[in-house]
Amino acid sequence: MKHLYIIVEGETELEFVNRILKPYFISKGLNTHIQGLMITMKGGGHGVNNIEHFKKTIKPLLYNENEPIITTMIDHYGINSEKKLPNYTNCIKELDIEKRIFCMEQSLTNAVNSIKEYRFFIPNIVRHEMETLLFANPEKGFELEKKEIRNEIIAICAEIPNIEDINCTPQGAPSKRLIKIYNNNNQKYNKASLGVDIAELAGIDSILQKSPRFKSWIDKIIQVVKEEKENKQ
């Protein structure tokens, strides 16, 4: 079975891969090497602030003799320049968010193919950011938080049933909403310390149920890995 690598932006996303995605994939029969890999920036740090950092991170995997399946977990919200993603200017002309993200994913694929034509790359840009997933089951996900915090998040989910529609404006992005809600309740939202705990409490089943685009990505990974296993038999 081919190895699976998931390229992520930072430590929280890496923890999400290790604590949430890996156990789920294994439960679905993906008994293979599954590894998250952070995009490393020049001089230290992690994230997507230059497409060259992404290309440098993925390049060794493209020449791995195992020809692993490689995918990404990158926030749509943070992509805001040609430096971060070539063809960004054309992509944002799309008013439909799904078409815009599809354009960005195609551009990400083109960046990979500029290094090497690679058939086992599955581009994925999260709509709109990782924090989107934390709204999947606010009753459970935020059950350890103050009642006032939990109730404000439940209200948002009641207003916007498809959590992937929670918008990506500077004021309305999921992370910005969480920061404001916590601040209003004299607390601090810290993605690193809270993010994966909330996702774990919410449960992967709730996340998949409430996040169609995210679910489509997960399903595609499972399909491709299993198909390649069958092709090798």
Image (cartoon, rainbow, N blue to C red):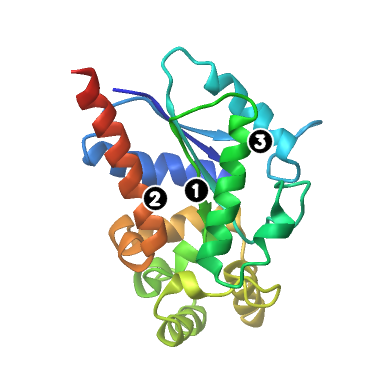
Name the residue at the right extreme.
43
> At 50% from the left edge and 27% from the top edge, which residue is drawn?
118
Q: Which quarter of the image is occupied by the N terminus? A: top left
Q: Which residue in the structure is indicated by mark 2?
A: 217
Q: Nearer the viewer, residue 45 or 41?
A: 41
Q: CA distance from mark 3 to mark 1?
A: 13 Å
The spot of residue 4 in percent (x, y) is 40, 30
Q: Earlier in the sequence, mark 3 or mark 1?
A: 3
Q: Are marks 2 and 1 in contact (CB under 8 Å)?
A: yes
**Within 10 angstroms of label 2, few (less than 14), some, or many (20 or more) residues?**
many
Residue 45: x, y in percent?
73, 38
Residue corresponding to mark 3? 54
The picture quadrant where one finds residue 112 is top right
- Percent coordinates x, y for residue 182 in the rendering: 61, 75
Amino acid type of the residue that numbered disc 1 sits on in the rendered structure? Asn
Q: CA distance from mark 3 to mark 2?
A: 20 Å
- Residue depicted at 36% across the width and 63% down the height: 212
* Horizontal relation, residue 174 to residue 85: left or right: left
Q: Earlier in the sequence, mark 3 or mark 2?
A: 3
Residue 124 is tagged as: 1
Question: Please, is residue 63 above or below residue 136 in the view?
Answer: above
User: Which of disc 1 and disc 2 is earlier in sequence?
Assistant: 1
Quick check: 159 above or below 55? Answer: below
The kind of secondary structure element at disc 2 is helix
Is residue 129 something one can see in this rendering?
no
Looking at the rendered structure, the kind of residue marked 3 is: Phe
Please state which amino acid type lies under the numbered disc 2.
Trp
Quadrant of the snapshot with the C terminus: top left
Instruction: Find residue 6 and name its label.
Output: none
26 is higher (above) or lower (below) than 60: below
